[in-house]
Every structure is written in C-alpha cells, then in structure tokens.
Amino acid sequence: MTKLSAIRPLRPASRMNVWAVISKTFLHAFLICLGIVVIYPLIWMALNGFKNNAQIFGNPFALPIGWSWANYVQAWNQGVRDYVSVSLLVTVASGLCTVLVSAWTAFGLTRTKMPAKPLVVGFVLGGLMLSPTVAVIPLVRMMQALGLYNTYWALIILYTAFRVPFSTFLIRAYMLDLSRDLDEAAVMDGASEGQIFWRITLPLCRPIVVSCVILHVLFAWNEYLFAMIFSSGVGAQTLPVGLTSIMATHGTNYAEVFAAMTISALPIVIVFFAAQRYFIRGLSDGIGK
Amino acid sequence: MAVTGVNSGAVTYGAATGQGASGTPRSRLRNLLSFRWVAVAVILIGWFVYYPIVDNFIVSTTDQDIFTGEVSDVGLANYDRLLHDPVVWTSLWNNSLYAVISIVFQVFGAFLLAAIIEGLGSERLRRFWRAIYFVPSAISITVTGLLFYFIYQPEIGLLDAALRSVGLDALVKPWLGDPKTAIYAIIAMSQWQGFGYSTLLFAIAIQKIPRELYDAAIIDGAGPSRRLWSITFPLTREMTGLMIIITITGAFQVFNEVMVMTAGGPNNSSQVLGTWLYQQGFIENNFGYGAAIAGVIFVVTMVTGIAQLLYTRRRRVQF
C-alpha cells in the first residue's frame, strides 16, 4: 500500500504508521492463506501420485516416502497416453478450424460490402447465447444420423461450431479497430480480397488470433459434457472422459488415479503460465460474452 | 471498457471492395459474393447451434426410445410432468443456490480480492497473486471435481483430516455422501475453482481506472476503504453487473462438477437441471422428458442472455 504513505502528513504520524503496518501485515497474511488454500490441494494431488495406497490411507499431510514414478508410468501406459493423443488431436483440429472460420467470418463482416450485414452479425454472435446443454439431445440424434456418434469427428465439429461465435466476436472487434490504410493501398495495386485477407489482415490480427487459440485450447482440453456424450466409445475418449473411466476401472488404485489427474492438469497449467499475456488479453477483450 | 455490444456491426466498411459505383449489376454480384467469407460459419452455427434448439422443442413434445426408435406424440405432457416432478424443483433450488453463493464469492468476493491485489505496491506481487489464484480455473473441472471428491472423502481426504487435527472431530462427515451437505460441498469446490477467474477480470477492470482519481482522493484525505467504495466500486459497477449476469447463466448450466462428484446423489439431493437432463435423457432413455428439462434451461439462459445484451448496450462509463 504505497498510497498510504502519501496520507501521512494529514494525520498524526505515529498512529498512521501503526495502522498502516497492521493492515499491511493483515492483508499479506490473508493473501498468503488464500494462496495456500488454492495451491495446496493441487500439490497434494501431485504428491499422492508418488505414494502407494497404504500411504494414501495414512496421514494425508505426510510427504511420500519415496519419489517413484511408477504410478505415473503405469497411468500413462494404462490409457492416459491414448486419452492424451485424442485430446491433442481434437484440441488442435478444432482450434485450427475455429480460428480459421472465425477469421474468415470477421473479415467478411468488417471488410466487405455484404448485404444484410447486421443480420449476419446478429446471427453469428447470437450463437453466444445458446448453451450446449440445451442442444445435447437433438445433437445426439443428429450425430447418430451422420454416423459420427462416438467418434472424435463429432467433437471437432461441435467444438468448432460452438466456439466460432466467441472467436468471431473477439477477432471482429480487433479488425474493426485495425487501420484500413494497407488494405486500400493493396486494392490500388490490384490485390484481390483473398490476397488482402491472407497477406495483410490475418497477419495484422496475429495477437488476437493467438489469444483465441489459447482460449480455445483451454476450452477444448477441459470440455466434459460433449466429450462424455459423444466420445464415450473406446479409442475416442478425451482426457476428461478418460479420467472418469480410469476412476471407474482402477478406482481402487487411488495413487494411479492421482497420477493420471496430475498428468492431465499439468500441460494446461504450463500453457497458462507460458501464454499468460495472450490469455489475459483474450479474457479482457471477451468479457462482453 | 472492453465490453463491446453485439449491436455495432451495422457500419459498412467498403474500402476493399469500394471501387465501381454501387448498384451496378457487377458490384451487386461482388457484394453477394462476399457471403462466401461467412458461409462456413453461418452453416456450422445454423446447423449445429440453432437447429438443435428448435429440434429440442419438437423432441420435447414426443416420447421416444433411442433404441427401438419408437416415437409417439404426447403434446405438452412432458412439461406437465416437469411441474409435478419433485427432482425438478430440487434441481431449480440447487441451481439457484449455486447462483447466489457464486455471486457472493465470485462477484463480490472477487471484487474485494482484486481491489486488495491491485492496491499492492509492487507490480511483480500483483502479477504473482493474480496468476496463483487463477491456476485452478485453467485446470479441467473433471480434474478438480475428482480431486475434491477425494478431498471430501472421510478415509483419505484432506478436509476431515484437517478438521480432526484442529479438534473439530464433531464436524467430520462424508461431505458428498450426506444429502444435507452434498450440494454445498460441490458449490464450495466450484468457488475454489472459479474465484481466480473473476478476480482476474475485476483486476483488469480496476487497472483501467485512471490513477489521477486515486491521487486526488488521497489529497482530499480519503482512506483506503473510502477510495474503495467511492472510486473503485462505482467505476467497476458495469463489470459487476456483467459478472452477476454471467454467473447466473453459468449457475443454470452447471453440469460437470456435479456429474463427476455425485452424479446428483445421494437420493437426488444434489441434482441440478443439467444432471437431471442427463439422467432422464441418457440413463433412463426418456429423450422427450430430457428435452423438456433442457427447455427450462433454455428459458433461463435466454432471459439472462437478453439481460446481458441489454446491459452491454447501455451507455458505458466513460473516462
């Protein structure tokens, strides 16, 4: 609280000092306690992956006796590897589709003289208001009819369809603020719309595109409702669904479940810390959602 | 503010296609061709986002078995059943609890926390706390749900062990196994996971308040709490309103954590609309009835969605 020092001349100096020190100490203690409540369960999860069942049933606050990776290796080999690869595939494929389709759409909505543009904007962004939960029963019938039920294609399509409105919203707002000078110069030189999109607009939008990708990764890696309903078949399970099925099949081997949970949480935490800047931009631009 | 209404798309920017007088057949054709940019999105969204909502209402007036495929038209019988289904009322109550508790912690609690963090002297400390508190929000709710499933377990869990270690043995219980506490235990997990996210958003809003306002208040002798209520709170009011609406919308769509931690049990005491929909539609194969429950979620989220739209359209705080 540096601001407090500025008040000092207005009040008796000694009293102010005491209060400032007390409140400062109290605030820091509060932040630290809250930080422990937030982080300790996650550390406990990772530590339990190093224990065996007997230790897990012992004192929950104790550190593991040895640092054996056996549970992690076993979890990885008994399914987590497959779940990770499906999750990776679905996340990357739906992420690419989402960003590409959204950038096209945003370009069309900001750089062309399309008729009925407000209507199209309303249609695309209106998708933000519709929740996946409400659509899930009809979607099952639809995916069954298309023969995509229990495949990861269903997830790729649905993640794209349900995330395009949000990404379009972000990219469109960014494009509206972009200067059009370069576009006009390119038109003078005879560039087509397609060339303008690929060579000028898209590269200029790189910051917001990166934010969209990060937010999409967070969404797709963690999504559970669609994943559970559309990919419960063997070989199509994403990580969140796989975790619950590990829980169902190896549920008695707690240590292995903890190891699997840690493996599934770690990549996204790393992505978050590595890409924090883009993440926060995406969130702050997207709060209108 | 970063809040952008959905309504500002009416402006036409014609720089890229601006040559040639508009109105000639050629330029009209070119304008129509611009639809190719939005075609994929419109088809995808129309097909997989809008159409299912319409279809859901059609399904909700039928009784259908997914395995035999037999469909019978039952009119509004499923909605009538909703009104007399005690679990629907339990679910609505639990969803509302979710909303209220989340507003307390994830809107007002997060606002206070963000104000405390943004009041810290060092930028490194501010960044550190924002990131630490956000970590659970980055992790899959399946993982955090499973984690707290274990934390709440009497034999191996942290919570009961912690209570015992401070002598509160009387409070020790299977938190998720007791119909009285199950939904509260789930909601508590959700607060743990979500408050860092809203704290981050409030922190971003607070950062946008011009420093001069605080400097002027300090010169006038305003203490920290006075500055909080006279500057920070009113100038982030818009964010607060928006967060309340988003929180309510989220509370009525809750599914994952309840599914992972209790699947609605024990005795349906922790059911929410989402899990009851799943139970009816996918476990008991009452597609029609499940669709009617989905209809309730649709109505609630539509109301909050329109509220949000109207809210973001209003004039914003200008600095």
Image: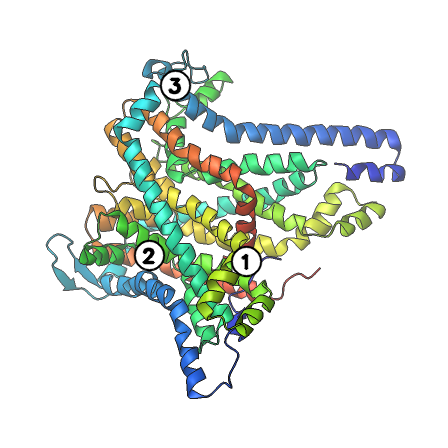
Say which element carries label 1: helix
Residue occupying image coordinates x 46% and y 74%: A117
- In the rendering, which numbered label is found on residue B253? none
Could you tell me if the residues under marks 1 and 3 are in contact, i.e. CB atoms within 8 Å?
no
Chain letter, disc 3 residue: A
Q: Is residue A145 left or right of residue B146?
A: left
Q: Is residue B202 left or right of residue B221?
A: left
- Do badges 2 and 3 share one subunit? yes
Image location of residue B250, percent across then percent down: 44, 50
* Residue B11, visible in the rendered structure: no
* Residue A159, visible in the rendered structure: yes
- Do badges 2 and 1 share one subunit? yes
Say which element carries label 3: loop
Q: Please give the residue where the numbered disc 2 appears in the rendered image.
A: A134
Sequence-wise, the earlier of marks 1 and 3 is 3
Q: Please give the residue where the numbered disc 1 appears in the rendered image.
A: A204
| Mark 2, other Cα within 10 Å: few <14 / some 14–19 / many ≥20 | many
Q: CA distance from mark 2 to mark 3?
A: 41 Å
Image location of residue B177, percent across then percent down: 33, 31
Chain letter, disc 1 residue: A
Residue occupying image coordinates x 72% and y 51%: B231
Residue occupying image coordinates x 50% and y 26%: A40
Give the farthest residue toward the top.
Answer: A65
Front-lying residue, B300 or A53? A53
Image location of residue A286, percent across then percent down: 52, 55
Chain letter, disc 2 residue: A
* Residue type at numbered disc 3: Phe
Q: Please give the residue where the numbered disc 3 appears in the rendered image.
A: A50
Sequence-wise, the earlier of marks 2 and 1 is 2
Give the vertical position of B80 relative to A48 (above or below).
below
